[in-house]
Amino acid sequence: METHHFETLRTARYHMLGDAQRSAEVWYLLHGYGQSAADMLSASSALASGERLLVAPEGLSRFYLRAGTGPVGASWMTREDREQEIRDCLRWLDGLAEHLRGSLGARRSVVLGFSQGAAAAWRWALLGSSKLERLIAWGGAVPSDLDVGRHADRLRALQVHIVRGANDATYDAQALERDRERLAGIGVAVDTPGFQGGHRLDDALLRQLSGAPPAQ
């Protein structure tokens, strides 16, 4: 059996929240495994602001969450045909960022990836062609196959945050420490804010990271 690849056009989906013309910055929100872009946007609603445009792209691989029926979620990639899926993901995110720059002009850009979306965010920030100012990896590890040393200069130009909930069993304290040590080894300091919770986003910490005042 011979395996071949053929590039074909397909339509990707994203959701936006905010005033596109007024916004000073764009936040790209990358969902976790089995979520949808709409799920991620809803979970990140604490970031909503008149000066912040929230953009939630959706992974290209959708599937039924319950044995061929019921709700539909999406994935950024699997281990199958891995390298090609990574390239497709980068092409999709870079294409979206270029499209928005064309319609909105230059904006300060932040990527926040949750769980599997954190791995996608790391890859986009280091391997993509888009200019990003901040990377927030929430509840997900630095991909083990990503050569961070090769991209140390690019990492140092980023404001990097790694977020973990105190009770997150998916991304545990040992994994966070390994990532912190791995980055420290190439001279990259990261901010590691936390919160009292599990494998989820946290409204108060989202507001803190955005620079917004606490909710009253």
Image (cartoon, rainbow, N blue to C red):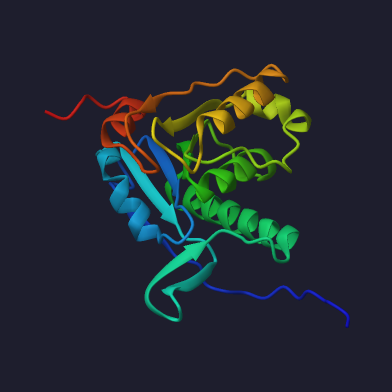
In this view, 96 is above or below 170: below
Q: Residue furthest left?
A: 216
Position of 26 compared to 124: left or right?
left
**Which residue is at a point 45% across and 81% down the rendered structure image?**
68
Instruction: Provide residue 177's location: percent of width, then percent of height.
Output: 58, 25
| Residue 82 in view in this figure | yes
Instruction: Provide residue 62's location: percent of width, then percent of height.
Output: 49, 70
Question: In front here: 148 or 69?
Answer: 69
Question: In front here: 107 or 56?
Answer: 56
Instruction: Provide residue 15's location: percent of width, then percent of height.
Output: 37, 58
Instruction: Provide residue 178's location: percent of width, then percent of height.
Output: 63, 28
Question: In front here: 160 or 54?
Answer: 160
Question: In front here: 140 or 98?
Answer: 140
Position of 18 compared to 111: left or right?
left
Position of 143 compared to 52: left or right?
right
**Which residue is at a point 35% across and 44% down the rendered structure image?**
53
Q: Which image quadrant: the N terminus?
A: bottom right
| Residue 17 in view in this figure | no
Label count reads 0
Q: Which quadrant of the view contains residue 61? A: bottom right
Q: Which quadrant of the view contains residue 214? A: top left
**Which residue is at a point 29% across and 52% down the rendered structure image?**
42
Position of 72 compared to 2: left or right?
left
